[in-house]
């Protein structure tokens, strides 16, 4: 929203410094909206009025020092010039304070605004009156707020004002925002405050969690009954870490109870004390780096000697990478052949990580999410992870909040959508800084978080509490073992939310199918459509789609078909052949039957159909790209659920109530509307058919489940069972066998036989 006085401030800059391009003061857009561009211009104008020749956007040590040296403080007696005063007045307006008429006069309105600013900052006790002191001026020329904004916490604001008021005279302490939100600046100010209270001199206190600070905290354990500034600092740290406690100078029993809850959450010893490990976890993201973790991750293959070294060191869970796009860098980064078997043999468990580059914002996009999801799922399957494993997709850089909104969230939404599309073979986790993990998880795109807390300087870690769904907390790099068992790992604390997997599928004896290569499209289309025409199944007058359109529709589901085929160790050609054959036979008669089903379940039977024979018996029809009936889909899914092949709630195939809530209709509608779901269902129908189709009108003798090494007779039988047990199922299956061979020949060429 535009502000009239901010607009006046912008005009003042543009008019007064009309030769600003030469001076280094850019011309501003006169839109009445404040922002960094405006604050930078005002900073440069202030520097110019102070006689600084080299202007900068930064209100740095030179500007601050010169303010103190030249004026000490700024008020009606020391303001050096009218334009200097106008710059101050403009800055006040950009902060939301009444700066007067931007007339160059340090008048009563300016004084009232300065007094209010000092009060809001919490420095009014140190700087009483209506003068502007250098550090306050520095705080005026930025975008920090000194009132609660955006649903900020009044308690956090009280802490921010207390910190400002208590420490503003220390050399390296500057005014922090008082907006009710934890932040990087607030986190650093807390460390400085601890160092000041430990007695560190200016210049020694630096806001870093070094050996001196750690040693000092070890002698400041707090328990119930403790009072004073240390209790205030501890309670403040608890509040800033999203703990529902009062900001107080007394360590109460209620605070002790909250500490126990926090300690349990962070997997610290539950003492209820303000001890060193708890102080550490409250002040820096990695906490006490001497803690022993039960989890680790690394880029080194786990050999028998290394597995033993990890086990001896107390590790249970090992994070390993699914993929390494480089053939030269970190040659053992990707899980090596036989490695998971070694992990299992030594009683360890493994959680998979997926990362290619992922180190800058331009990597993340919706398209990249699709690619990464597919590759991660295929790689997880290839290495032997069972369905349901949590894969941690990496954000391995300091993504700022705007980048999370613009790039990271759409990327993870894309991963989630693609994983759902492929039948959810694996679950989704996130590796990254606290803020990224929390926001992606809150959006529903990740189940658990693997937190890169070791990167304590990341803005996404500083000022953010531990994500509620954290599974692993990465705190330090260390070496384990010796000799052949030596390896470098990242030491992680485990919460127990994810225990990885300790049993793995053996590698398939034959190569599995991979994604379709579009360079084969024209050749495949020529063969497949030509074959259909040669057997008299080319375009018919009642067909809705051409054979080419049918083929392209099936290939558009290739990601799903590939995922299903790999997950259940079957050939893609089984699904491709069935879906293509059935879709080629979808005609106008099928459309009418589908309409009848919708009319029946929604109660919207039109007048013209009311007297049609059997109109109230339209319980089901063969629909969707694979001509799947609702009852067939329910039976196949129920079978898969009972065998643990998919997750879900069984449906009642006999529920044909004339209601949209009927189970038969809900399944029918989904296969009718969702091509990806229908393609997945084809694979499950083949599995159910091989098991004998129990639950169908007629049971057949069980046969071997679809496998990569199916014989021709097994392929024929499972294709036939999809269509039924009476003609034309047998003769059609004979006709579909050459079509299977066509699809399989291209799949074999693409996968490398």
Image (cartoon, rainbow, N blue to C red):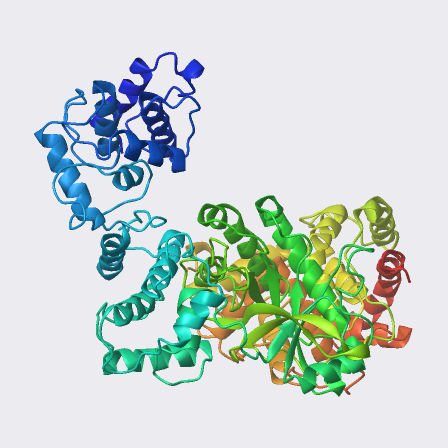
Is 343 drawn above or below residue 477 in the view shown? below
Quarter placement of the C terminus: bottom right
Is 291 drawn above or below residue 628 in the view shown? below
Left or right: 499 in relation to 49: right
- Image position, residue 508 (x, y; %): 83, 75
Q: Quadrant of residue 118?
A: top left
Question: Taking the image as drawn, is residue 619 in sight?
Answer: no
- Image position, residue 510 (x, y; %): 87, 71
Left or right: 574 in relation to 276: right
Q: Nearer the viewer, residue 148 or 73?
A: 73
Q: Nearer the viewer, residue 396 or 713?
A: 396
- Image position, residue 478 (x, y; %): 65, 71
Residue at image point 48% right, 63% down? 210
Residue furthest top in the image: 19
Residue at image point 59% right, 56% down? 396
Is 7 drawn above or below residue 333 in the view shown? above
């Amino acid at each position: 929203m535009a502000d009239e006085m901010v607009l006046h401030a912008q005009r003042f800059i543009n008019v007064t410094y009309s030769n600003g391009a030469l001076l280094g003061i850019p011309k501003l857009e006169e839109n009445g909206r404040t922002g960094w561009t405006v604050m930078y211009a005002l900073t440069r104008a202030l520097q110019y009025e102070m006689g600084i020749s080299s202007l900068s956007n930064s209100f740095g040590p030179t500007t601050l020092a010169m303010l103190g040296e030249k004026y000490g403080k700024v008020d009606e007696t020391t303001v050096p010039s009218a334009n200097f005063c106008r710059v101050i007045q403009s800055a006040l307006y950009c902060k939301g304070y009444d700066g007067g008429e931007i007339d160059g006069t340090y008048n009563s309105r300016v004084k009232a605004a300065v007094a209010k600013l000092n009060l809001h900052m919490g420095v009014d006790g140190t700087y009483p009156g209506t003068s502007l002191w250098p550090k306050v001026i520095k705080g005026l020329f930025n975008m920090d707020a000194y009132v609660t904004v955006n649903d900020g916490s009044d308690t956090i604001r009280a802490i921010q004002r207390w910190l400002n008021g208590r420490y503003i005279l220390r050399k390296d302490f500057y005014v922090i925002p008082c907006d009710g939100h934890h932040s990087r600046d607030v986190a650093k100010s807390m460390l400085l405050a601890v160092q000041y209270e430990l007695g560190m001199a200016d210049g020694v206190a630096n806001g870093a969690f070094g050996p001196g600070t750690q040693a000092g905290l070890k002698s400041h354990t707090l328990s119930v009954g403790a009072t004073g500034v240390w209790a205030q600092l501890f309670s403040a740290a608890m509040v800033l870490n999203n703990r529902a406690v009062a900001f107080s100078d007394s360590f109460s029993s209620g605070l002790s109870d909250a500490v126990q809850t926090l300690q349990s959450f962070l997997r610290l010893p539950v003492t209820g004390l303000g001890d060193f490990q708890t102080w550490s976890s409250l002040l820096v993201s990695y906490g006490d780096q001497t803690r022993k973790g039960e989890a680790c991750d690394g880029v080194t293959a786990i050999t028998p000697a290394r597995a033993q070294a990890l086990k001896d060191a107390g590790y249970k869970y090992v994070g390993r990478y699914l993929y390494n796009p480089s053939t030269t860098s970190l040659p053992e980064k990707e899980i090596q052949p036989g490695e998971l078997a070694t992990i299992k043999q030594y009683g360890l468990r493994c959680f998979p990580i997926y990362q290619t580059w992922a180190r800058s914002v331009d990597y993340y996009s919706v398209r990249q999410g699709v690619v990464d999801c597919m590759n991660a799922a295929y790689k997880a399957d290839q290495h032997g992870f069972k369905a349901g494993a949590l894969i941690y997709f990496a954000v391995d850089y300091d993504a700022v909040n705007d980048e999370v909104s613009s790039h990271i969230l759409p990327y993870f939404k894309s991963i989630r959508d693609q994983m759902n599309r492929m039948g959810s073979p694996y679950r989704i986790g996130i590796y990254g800084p606290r803020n990224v993990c929390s926001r992606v998880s809150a959006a529903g795109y990740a189940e658990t978080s693997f937190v890169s807390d070791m990167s304590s300087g990341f803005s996404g870690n500083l000022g953010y509490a531990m994500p509620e769904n954290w599974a692993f907390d990465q705190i330090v790099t260390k070496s384990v073992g010796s000799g052949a068992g030596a390896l470098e790992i990242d030491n992680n604390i485990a919460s127990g939310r994810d225990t990885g997997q300790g049993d793995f599928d053996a590698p398939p004896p034959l190569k599995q199918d991979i994604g379709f290569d579009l360079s084969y499209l024209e050749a495949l289309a020529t063969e497949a459509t030509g074959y259909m025409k040669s057997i008299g199944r080319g375009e018919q007058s009642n067909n809705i789609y051409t054979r080419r359109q049918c083929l392209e529709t099936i290939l558009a589901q290739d990601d799903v078909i590939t995922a299903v085929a790999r997950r259940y160790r079957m050939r893609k050609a089984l699904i491709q052949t069935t879906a293509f054959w059935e879709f080629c036979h979808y005609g106008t008669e099928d459309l009418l039957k589908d309409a009848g089903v919708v009319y029946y379940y929604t109660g919207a039977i039109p007048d013209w159909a009311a007297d049609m024979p059997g109109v109230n018996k339209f319980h089901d029809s063969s629909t969707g790209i694979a001509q799947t009936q609702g009852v067939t889909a329910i039976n196949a899914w129920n079978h898969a659920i009972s065998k643990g092949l998919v997750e879900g709630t069984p449906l009642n195939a006999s529920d044909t109530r004339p209601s949209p809530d009927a189970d038969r209709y809900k399944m029918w509608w989904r296969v009718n509307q969702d091509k990806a779901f229908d393609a997945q269902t084809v694979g499950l129908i083949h599995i159910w058919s091989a098991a004998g189709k129990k639950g169908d009108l007629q049971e057949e003798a069980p046969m071997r489940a679809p496998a990569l090494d199916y014989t021709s007779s097994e392929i024929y039988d499972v294709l036939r069972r999809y269509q039924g047990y009476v003609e034309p199922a047998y003769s059609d299956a004979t006709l579909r066998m050459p079509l299977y061979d066509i699809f399989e020949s291209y799949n074999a060429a693409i996968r490398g036989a």
